[in-house]
Image: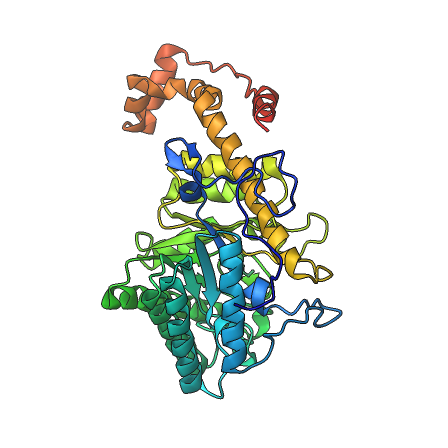
């Protein structure tokens, strides 16, 4: 036990009228929603990086957080893990997620990185065996170290491709060892700053080959989890190749990987791409590649990836509505890829940020489930497309332009517009919030 969270109790569900700050008001893991426990619907994961590795910097200033585990030794890494697993327990979190660099000290070379990662993986495994949470996903940080400044798989230097591929192998091994249910690739610096120095065709080919190698390795080691790509349109590079869900799907199809790889959709990244979160989720569901979510929002005015905890129930409800319509999570879950604001210095801030976020998600899920059970939204959608249920409409899809034209003339087809009923539907949705 460390004393970092001294005095903070383990959080339990105490209902909306709870007095204490340290309580769940809406997140009730055992409550049954649409026949499934709330915990099994939401599948919350706590991220290692923003909570335990990020020092509180912004573009104008460095570290604001003073944490006893900041430092680049194995002792620091183990203290960090001790505190992290205490936080997982306080929050009753079923899952966590990590990058290699979050959990291990940086070594002098690849071999030392690997030794450090392997030792920390065993340290984590022991904590997980002793009742800790499960691993939702692992990933490699191929964007912070200066060697990755011009990309990883898309780097002009083949040695960086090699270093990146070898690093991903070790991270997949660690994820497999810890029973991870997914493995994520966010293309941190897979993109470019200027076309003047960039061979885009070559970079895209390399990125496709890299991903194919990841899938081949997954099968080789018998990893049963899902490989996920996390789209993002820009930041850090000006043009990120995995722009959004539709772009990633086109890329997967080009390399024949659309049945092997799914997407991890982050709310803030959707916003940066000019989409809503629910648009990205619905796109992935329609294309058969919906995997998991990073539930962290951006500031709507700043235009940056601010990684804030969710605090807007209606927004979250519309996202879970699309997830429920798609059948809910399978291997995926709700990862809070969210960080405190840099003035939130206290240990309790870490706990309260997650408690609030988990409650907001629980409220959103309950509203989404109620809308589905009510059925009026789906009925209105059904009515709008009812013409397509007729056999002649289905037959038209199997015919051709000549036959359709003949039919339009023969029947004197003269379509009359119908109201889309948007405001009526928005009013209906608001009754569930
Ligand atoms: C970056 C981001 C990452 C990925 C994992 O914007 O979201 O933290 O989730 O590398
Ligand atoms: Co993310």
In this view of the protein, which residue sits in the foreground, 193 or 73?
Answer: 73
Residue 28 placement, left or right of 308: left
The x and y percentages for residue 415 are 47, 15
**Which residue lies most toward the top here?**
411
Residue plotted at (56% across, 26% down): 432
Q: Position of residue 11 (x, y in %)?
A: 55, 48
346 w.r.t. 37: above or below = below
Is any part of residue 273 visible from this angle? no
Residue 145 image-quadrant placement: bottom right
Q: Position of residue 180 (x, y in %)?
A: 36, 60
Q: Which of 358 and 270 is in front in this view?
A: 358
Location of the C terminus by quadrant is top right
Q: Can residue 255 be seen in this view?
A: yes
- Residue at x 54% of width, y 36% of height: 364
Q: Which colour scheme is used?
A: rainbow
Q: Where is residue 35 in the image (x, y as percent from the top left)?
A: 37, 32
Vertically, is 416 above or below 260? above
Report which quarter residue 378 is drawn in: top left
Asked if residue 36 is positioned above or below residue 412 in the image, the reply reads below
Q: In this view, does 107 lie to the left or right of 290?
A: right
Residue at 56%, 40% (x, y): give it: 316
Please identify the residue farthest to the bottom as the structure is shown: 108
Asked whether 125 or 415 is in front, the reply is 125
């Amino acid at each position: 036990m460390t004393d970092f969270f001294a005095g903070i109790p383990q959080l339990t569900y105490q209902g909306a009228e709870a007095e204490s700050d340290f309580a769940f008001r809406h997140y009730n893991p055992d409550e049954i929603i649409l026949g499934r426990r709330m915990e099994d619907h939401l599948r919350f994961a706590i991220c290692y990086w923003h909570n335990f590795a990020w020092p509180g910097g912004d573009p104008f200033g460095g570290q604001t957080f003073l944490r006893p585990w900041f430092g680049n030794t194995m002792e620091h890494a183990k203290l960090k893990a001790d505190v992290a697993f205490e936080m997982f327990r306080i929050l009753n979190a079923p899952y966590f997620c990590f990058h290699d660099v979050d959990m291990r000290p940086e070594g002098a070379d690849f071999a030392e990185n690997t030794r450090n990662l392997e030792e920390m993986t065993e340290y984590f495994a022991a904590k997980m065996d002793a009742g800790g949470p499960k691993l939702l996903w692992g990933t490699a940080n191929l964007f912070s170290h200066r060697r990755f400044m011009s990309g990883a798989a898309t780097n002009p230097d083949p040695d960086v491709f090699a270093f990146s591929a070898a690093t991903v192998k070790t991270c997949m091994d660690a994820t497999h060892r810890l029973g991870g249910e997914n493995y994520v690739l966010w293309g941190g610096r897979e993109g470019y700053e200027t076309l003047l120095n960039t061979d885009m065709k070559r970079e895209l080919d390399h990125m496709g080959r890299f991903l194919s190698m990841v899938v081949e390795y997954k099968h080789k080691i018998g990893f049963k989890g899902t490989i996920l790509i996390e789209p993002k349109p820009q930041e850090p590079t000006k043009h990120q190749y995995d722009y959004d869900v539709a772009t990633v799907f086109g890329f997967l199809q080009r390399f024949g990987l659309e049945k092997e790889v799914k997407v991890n959709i982050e709310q803030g990244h959707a916003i940066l791409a000019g989409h809503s979160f629910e648009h990205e989720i619905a796109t992935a569901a329609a294309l058969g590649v919906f995997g998991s979510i990073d539930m962290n929002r951006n500031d709507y005015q700043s235009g940056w990836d601010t990684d804030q905890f969710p605090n807007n129930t209606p927004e979250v409800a519309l996202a879970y509505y699309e997830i429920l319509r798609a059948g809910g999570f399978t291997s995926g879950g709700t990862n809070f890829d969210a960080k405190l604001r840099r003035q939130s210095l206290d240990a309790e801030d870490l706990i309260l940020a997650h408690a609030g976020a988990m409650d907001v998600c629980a409220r959103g899920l309950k509203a989404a489930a109620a809308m589905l059970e009510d059925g009026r939204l789906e009925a209105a959608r059904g009515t709008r497309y009812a013409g397509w249920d007729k056999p002649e409409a289905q037959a038209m899809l199997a015919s051709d332009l000549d036959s359709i034209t003949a039919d339009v003339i023969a029947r004197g087809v003269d379509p009359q517009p119908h109201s889309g009923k948007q405001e009526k539907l928005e009013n209906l949705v608001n009754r569930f919030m």
